[in-house]
């Protein structure tokens, strides 16, 4: 959620004059645009996925909001692709310590500094995780 790509909405959808940054969503269906947001009252047909966070919704309504500059980056985030797992796959990966799980203690995940999010969470977790806090995003650069 915190890895911006070099694209904006306008780059992908030229008929929408919007400079919202596109983020890396995951390796699945990277030719599809997805979005999460905090404004279900403005985007009908949204699906609640977490406390105050909604998935998708009516794209025609979204286009109007974008073209009229009604939304701001602390309310919505766009992604190319998504991450998905088979049944039990994610739980199995968590149990083998392939993932680092933490509580979302942010009041607004959309307003978090992308540059420091990962590092700060690792430092907060402490212990062996501190070692990874300063690792480059591409371990081949190490």
Image (cartoon, rainbow, N blue to C red):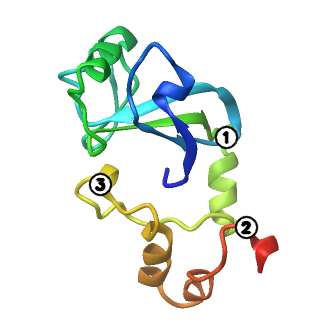
Label 3 vs 1, first from the N-terminus: 1
Secondary structure found at label 3: helix
**Residue 103, percent from left and from top:** 38, 64
What residue does disc 2 label?
Answer: 138
Mark 1 or mark 2, which is nearer to you? 2
Look at the image and tell me whether residue 45 can be seen.
no
Name the element at disc 2.
loop
Q: Which residue is mark 3?
A: 111
**Residue occupying the point 25% across, 38% down:** 72
Choose top left, top right, bottom left or bottom right for residue 37.
top left
The residue lying at 56 percent from left, 68 percent from top is 100
User: Residue 116 sits in which quadrant?
Assistant: bottom left
Q: Position of residue 38 (x, y in %)?
A: 26, 36
- CA separation in Å, label 1 and label 2: 23 Å
Q: What residue sits 39% from the left and 13% below the top?
A: 59
Asked whether, in this view, residue 74 is left or right of residue 32, the answer is left
**Outermost residue toward the right in this view:** 140
Instruction: Name the residue beneath numbered marker 1.
Output: 85
- Mark 1 / mark 2, whichever is N-terminal: 1
Q: Horizontal and vertical percent for residue 115? A: 46, 66
The residue tagged with tag 1: helix, strand or loop?
A: loop
Quadrant occupied by the C terminus: bottom right
Label 1 CA crowd tier, 10 Å (few <14, some 14–19, many 20+): few
Instruction: Give the mark nearer the N terminus: 3 vs 2.
Output: 3
Location of residue 50 (image quadrant): top left
């Amino acid at each position: 959620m915190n890895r911006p790509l070099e694209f904006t909405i306008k780059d992908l959808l030229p008929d929408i004059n919007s400079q919202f940054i596109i983020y890396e969503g995951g390796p699945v269906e990277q030719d599809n645009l997805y979005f999460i947001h905090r404004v279900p009252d403005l985007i009908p047909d949204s699906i609640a996925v977490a406390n105050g966070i909604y998935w998708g919704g009516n794209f025609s309504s979204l286009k109007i909001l974008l073209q009229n500059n009604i939304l701001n980056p602390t309310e919505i985030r766009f992604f190319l692709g998504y991450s998905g797992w088979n049944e039990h796959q994610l739980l199995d990966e968590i149990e083998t310590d392939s993932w680092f799980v933490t509580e979302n203690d942010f009041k607004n995940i959309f307003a978090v500094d992308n540059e420091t999010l990962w590092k700060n969470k690792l430092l907060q977790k402490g212990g062996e995780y501190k070692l990874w806090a300063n690792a480059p995003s591409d371990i081949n650069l190490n």
